[in-house]
Image (tube, grey):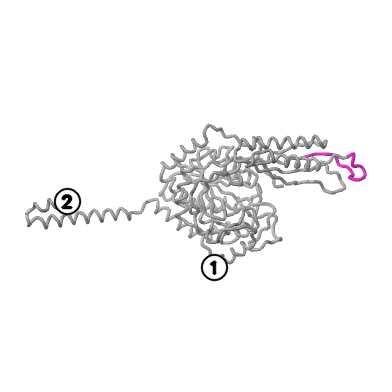
């Protein structure tokens, strides 16, 4: 209004000039604003570069993952798998320290200098008792171990992400230090616990990790704390028919313990999980067993409750030995903390996962996926969900599994994600998971993880304020708790799979 009035008081010969000038300035500011909108954020340019470069190396990382899938080495026995990852990192320019934390297959690969220091976790152990084949039908032939949790993909994606960040540091586009942690024996061996206990994460600012799964999403649920042990009973051998009174059965002790623990289930918090196997029950029915062994896991969302419930399991073992006149000893095998969630970091990773996107199947892969799903005896998601990213939302339960990443999360701010490396609906630790991991369905999900971890790391390297905010949240979440390994001061259980 005031512009209109002002133009009216001007001489006629000046009005046209005034309006033209006003229009020119308006046009200038409009164009300037549009230019600002189209300016590419330097971070986004680096992310685009990293995503493109990783995709160009698809065949190389596919070959590594399939090689480790074929090795299928169980916890603390991953000699060839660890060596392949170490060589890949060394060839890329990393300095590799092998055999850390008294574990022959553990390593730390480092590139760069100064702050920030970002760590990426890599796993590579297989599970015993799973046939190793990528057929969409259950096979009985094959190896005695298989990658039913996808750790061949886990380790390879983490190595790929580490190398991508190393390239950016080397070119001077970002500065700081990248570390790739070779973490053996996640499946019950608690490998990372020993690495935390050895102080290998003391100077790290943030740790990034991921895990194979049947969907794409950022980890915003905790995990169950876990304590495990092998209970060994020693009795007296005797002829089971000719002189049974002279024997004292170690198997009776194992079964008595199992019975008491099963009775105890009624009197523990409902979130508790207790499971076991009898690893040795004797050799012949006509010989009173002088040795028997059971292997127990105790889980609960809270670490303190795990300890108290485990102590009750020990009392059941002591009672079993007393009642059967046998001797009992037990060996702690593993112990892991619950997982601390860092929402600051989760928010960053969520945005980057949405940028990267999910997994798209070819027609042949869709056919394969349908065959896999036809073996399920439960309701399962549509195949198309592999192409989507789950929204970030609050989750209160601790899930059903445990992970030694929990101990890392008590040492340093930690963030993780899942990628759809398996056909939607596929449960972990299954022959279906093994099969999917041996196909390009698994590789595609692996590359989603590698890209997401890389671009998340780029945000952290280029925006120190994000790390500061994550550290502040970490302090508040952890509180006054002083970390103490649930497995005590024992040395790594290198032969726990024997």
Q: In this view, does 446 lie to the left or right of 287?
A: left
Q: Residues within 10 Å of mark 2 (few under 14, many from 20)?
A: few
Task: Identify the mark nearer the N-term, 1 or 2.
Answer: 2
Residue at 11% across / 58% down in the picture?
16
Q: Residues within 10 Å of mark 1 (few under 14, many from 20)?
A: few
Q: Which mark is residue 329?
A: none
- Residue 498 in view: yes
Label 2 element class = loop
Asked whether the beta carbons under mark 1 and mark 2 sit within 8 Å of each other, the answer is: no
Q: Is 105 a magenta residue?
A: no
On screen, residue 366 above or below 35: below
Q: Which mark is residue 363?
A: 1
* Magenta segment boundaries in residue numbering: 233-246
Q: Is 242 a magenta residue?
A: yes
Residue at 7% across / 56% down in the picture?
12
Residue at 39% across / 54% down in the picture?
45
Which residue, given by chain and number where applicable, does mark 2 sit on?
1
- Residue 95 in view: no
Kindly report the distance in space between the C-alpha atoms of the residues bearing marks 1 and 2.
63 Å
Q: In this view, does 236 lie to the left or right of 468?
A: right
Percent coordinates x, y for residue 203 in the rendering: 50, 38
Percent coordinates x, y for residue 149 in the rendering: 61, 52
Residue at 75% across / 37% down in the picture?
317
Towards the viewer: 264 or 325: 264
Where residue 464 sits, quadrant-wise, is top left
Percent coordinates x, y for residue 315 in the rendering: 73, 35
| Mark closer to the observer (1, 2) | 2
On screen, residue 40 above or below 415: below
On screen, residue 105 above or below 434: above
């Amino acid at each position: 209004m005031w512009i209109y009035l002002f133009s009216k008081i001007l001489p006629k010969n000046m009005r046209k000039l005034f309006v033209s000038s006003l229009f020119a300035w308006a046009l200038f500011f409009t164009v300037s604003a549009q230019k600002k909108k189209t300016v590419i954020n330097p971070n986004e340019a680096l992310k685009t570069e990293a995503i493109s470069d990783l995709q160009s190396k698809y065949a190389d990382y596919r070959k590594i993952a399939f090689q480790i899938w074929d090795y299928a080495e169980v916890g603390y026995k991953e000699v060839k798998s660890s060596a392949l990852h170490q060589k890949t990192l060394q060839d890329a320019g990393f300095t590799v320290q092998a055999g850390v934390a008294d574990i022959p297959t553990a390593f730390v690969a480092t590139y760069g200098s100064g702050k920030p220091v970002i760590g990426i976790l890599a796993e590579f152990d297989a599970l015993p008792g799973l046939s190793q084949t990528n057929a969409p039908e259950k096979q009985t032939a094959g190896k005695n171990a298989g990658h039913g949790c996808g750790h061949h993909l886990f380790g390879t994606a983490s190595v790929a992400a580490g190398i991508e960040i190393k390239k950016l540091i080397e070119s001077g586009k970002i500065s700081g230090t990248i570390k790739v942690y070779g973490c053996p024996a996640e499946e019950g061996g608690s490998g990372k616990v020993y690495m935390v206990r050895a102080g290998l994460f003391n100077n790290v600012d943030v740790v990034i990790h991921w895990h194979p799964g049947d969907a794409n999403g950022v980890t915003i649920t905790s995990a169950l704390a876990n304590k495990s042990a092998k209970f060994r009973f020693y009795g007296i051998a005797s002829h089971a028919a000719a002189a049974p009174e002279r024997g004292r059965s170690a198997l009776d002790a194992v079964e008595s313990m199992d019975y008491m623990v099963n009775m105890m289930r009624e009197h523990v918090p409902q979130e508790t999980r207790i499971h076991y196997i009898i690893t040795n029950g004797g050799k012949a029915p006509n010989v009173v067993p002088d040795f028997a062994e059971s292997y127990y896991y105790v889980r609960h969302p809270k670490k303190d409750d795990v300890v108290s419930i485990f102590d009750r399991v020990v009392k059941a073992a002591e009672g079993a030995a007393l009642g059967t006149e046998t001797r009992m000893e037990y060996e702690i095998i593993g112990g892991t903390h619950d997982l601390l969630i860092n929402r600051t970091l989760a928010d960053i990773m969520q945005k980057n996962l949405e940028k990267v996107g999910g997994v798209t199947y070819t027609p042949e892969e869709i056919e394969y996926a349908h065959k896999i799903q036809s073996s399920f005896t439960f309701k399962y998601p549509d195949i198309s969900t592999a192409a989507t990213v789950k929204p970030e939302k609050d989750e209160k339960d601790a899930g059903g599994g445990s992970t030694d990443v929990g101990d890392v999360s008590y040492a340093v701010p930690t963030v993780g994600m899942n990628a759809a490396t398996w056909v939607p609906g596929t449960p972990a630790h299954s022959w279906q998971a093994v099969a999917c991991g041996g196909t390009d369905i698994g590789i595609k999900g692996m590359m989603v993880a590698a890209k997401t971890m890389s671009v998340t790391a780029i945000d952290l390297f280029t925006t120190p304020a994000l790390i500061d905010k994550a550290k502040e949240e970490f302090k508040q979440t952890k509180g006054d708790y002083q970390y103490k390994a649930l497995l005590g001061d024992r040395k790594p259980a290198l032969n726990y799979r024997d």
